[in-house]
Each structure stands twice: as C-alpha cells, then as structure tokens.
Image: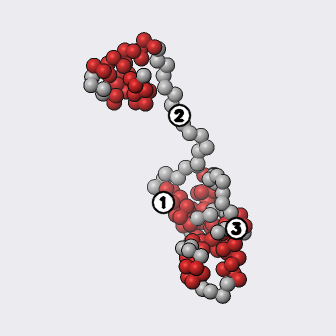
Amino acid sequence: MDKLKLLAGYQESEAGLKVYANINSVNQATITRWIKRFLLHGLAGVRHRTSNHRYSLVTKVNAVKDYQAGVTGQEVLQKYDIRSISQLKQWSIQYNNAELQTTSRKRVRKMGRKVSFEEKKQIVQWIIDHDNDYQAAKIQFDVSYQRVYSWVRK
C-alpha cells in the first residue's frame, strides 16, 4: 500500500496507531517515522528518493554543532532538511572522532597497468609453476587477482 494512502487512512481512522498498524501489516514505528517526516518535510518527506541525498561538509558540521549545542534532533532535521535522526547521530559520532567528511560523488578506481602478451604468458606460467598461487602472483607482478585469474582460465 502507498505511504500517502496509509497516512490518509490513519488520519481518517478512529483506530489507535497500534491497531491501525496491525490491520495494515505495517510496523508501528514505521508509520510513526512517516508521520514525523510528513510533518517536517511535507509530501517530499514521505516520497521515495530515487538517489541518495548528498550533504556538504559545512551542512554536516553545522547540523552536528547545533545538535550538540542542545537543539532538539527534530529541529535540526527540519532546519537542514535531513530525513533521519540516525543520519545525524552518525555524523555526530564521525565529528567527535574527526572522521566527518563530505560525500564524494566519484569512485576512485585504480586502472591496472599495461601488460604485454608476453608478460601475460610469463605470469600464467609462473602461476602454474607455483601451484596456482594467484595471491603471490598478484604481489609479485603488481597486477590484480581478477586479471591474473582470468588469464589463467583462458
């Protein structure tokens, strides 16, 4: 069932939250969370996000500082448009451990070095001679385990 329909149904219902949750086979805490999100963010709060929301480091630090200064969690969530108190608590822990960082959009990927056909043959022969020790070959020849394994399989 759609979140909005459930929330509208609960609002029109005379049943208590626990009974309504049981009737609709939804956890009571889940409905409570949806209600809070709806009250804080409106329709956008209960709609499913198609991608993760990225927050700047400044936003994270300011939110954590407000939270640690005694501003209630709900007020911080509303002020900085954060959807979950658990996210804020996680940032707070990271901030206290000096690990809080901005979310990177890029995935760092190390490209493997160029390997000639002759060198591939040499590596494959070395692996065969050393009882298929792919891990040692990886270190010995500075190539990834996956690449070495695929060469031997061919």
- Which amino acid type is marked by label 3? His
SS label for mark 3 = helix
**Viewer-side residue, 92 vs 69:** 92
**Viewer-side residue, 19 vs 120:** 19
Sequence-first tag of 2 and 1: 1
Residue 93: mark: 1
Residue at the farthest right position: 43
- Which amino acid type is marked by label 1? Ile
Q: Is residue 20 visible?
A: yes
Q: Is residue 142 visible?
A: no
Side of 32 relative to 123 (left or right): right
Q: Residue at x 36, y 19 (%)?
A: 124
Residue 56 x/y as whole percent:
63, 51
Sequence-first tag of 3 and 2: 3
Residue 51: mark: none
Q: Residue at x 52, y 52 (%)?
A: 100
* Mark 2 crowdedness (10 Å alpha carbons): few <14, some 14-19, many ≥20: few
Residue tagged by mark 2?
109
Side of 110 relative to 55 (left or right): left
Q: Residue at x 48, y 22 (%)?
A: 113
SS label for mark 1 = helix
Residue 41: mark: 3
- Which amino acid type is marked by label 2? Arg
